[in-house]
Image (cartoon, rainbow, N blue to C red):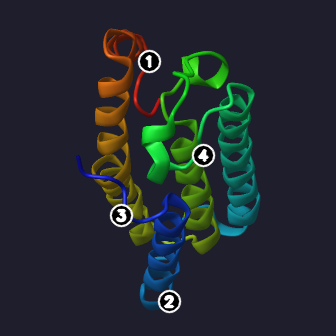
Amino acid sequence: MMRPIIPPPVILVFFIGIVFGIDAFSPLDLLLGRSGLVAALIASGAGLLIAVTGVMAFRRHQTTINPHTIDRVSALVTGGIYRLTRNPMYLGMLLVLIGAIFLSRDVLALLAVPAFIVTLNRLQILPEERALRARFGAAFDAYCARTRRWI
């Protein structure tokens, strides 16, 4: 079974670097004008809140949040924020990335969003889902049927 290799926060930092790298070389600063800072704070704040809510739910159920130790998962968390999204921590990271894009104000930096989603889906989420399906079987399949992967 393929296991996630790169910690998700490292992937986020990498994509934030891409956003500001694009901004440094692109003349297309068109997003939101001066209100970019406010939008960045709102998106990033919402992202942090969603991610922390996901972490707290895992802690309440005393299960691992570390994708590298998915074999140690002890509970299938489906309540709270997990009724709305199967991946609130990753959704939170996506909103932080969007906050960085708002801060950069660069239209081309929007390309980082689909690239980030594809990267997390392939490197993190799919291996995690395979492990959860192997561990929880039909209960995980039922959860997937009623709850979207992202939003």
The amino acid pointed to by label 1 is Thr
The amino acid pointed to by label 2 is Ala
Estimate the spatial distance between the alpha carbons at disc 3 and disc 2, rounded to whole Å: 15 Å
* Side of 138 relative to 60 (left or right): left
Q: Is the residue 102 above or below the residue 73 in the image?
A: below
Residue extending farthest to the bottom is 25
In terms of depth relative to the viewer, which is nearer, 131 or 112?
131
Image spot of residue 31 (x, y percent): 55, 64
Q: Using a 10 Å C-alpha cutoff, classify the residue at mark 3 as few (fewer than 14 neighbours), some (14 to 19) or many (20 or more).
A: few
Q: Which mark is residue 111?
A: 3
**1 or 2: mark nearer the eye:** 1
In terms of depth relative to the viewer, which is nearer, 124 or 34?
124
Estimate the spatial distance between the alpha carbons at disc 3 and disc 1, rounded to whole Å: 26 Å
Quarter occupied by residue 130: top left
Estimate the spatial distance between the alpha carbons at disc 4 and disc 3, rounded to whole Å: 18 Å
Estimate the spatial distance between the alpha carbons at disc 2 and disc 4, rounded to whole Å: 25 Å
Q: Which mark is residue 24?
A: 2
Q: Using a 10 Å C-alpha cutoff, classify the residue at mark 1 as few (fewer than 14 neighbours), some (14 to 19) or many (20 or more).
A: some
The residue shown at (31%, 25%) is: 133
Image spot of residue 150 (x, y percent): 44, 34
Which comes before the other along the chain, label 1 or label 4?
4
Image spot of residue 141 (x, y percent): 32, 15
Residue named by callout 4: 92
The answer to whether residue 59 is visible is: yes
Which comes before the other along the chain, label 3 or label 2?
2
The amino acid pointed to by label 4 is Gly
Residue named by callout 1: 147
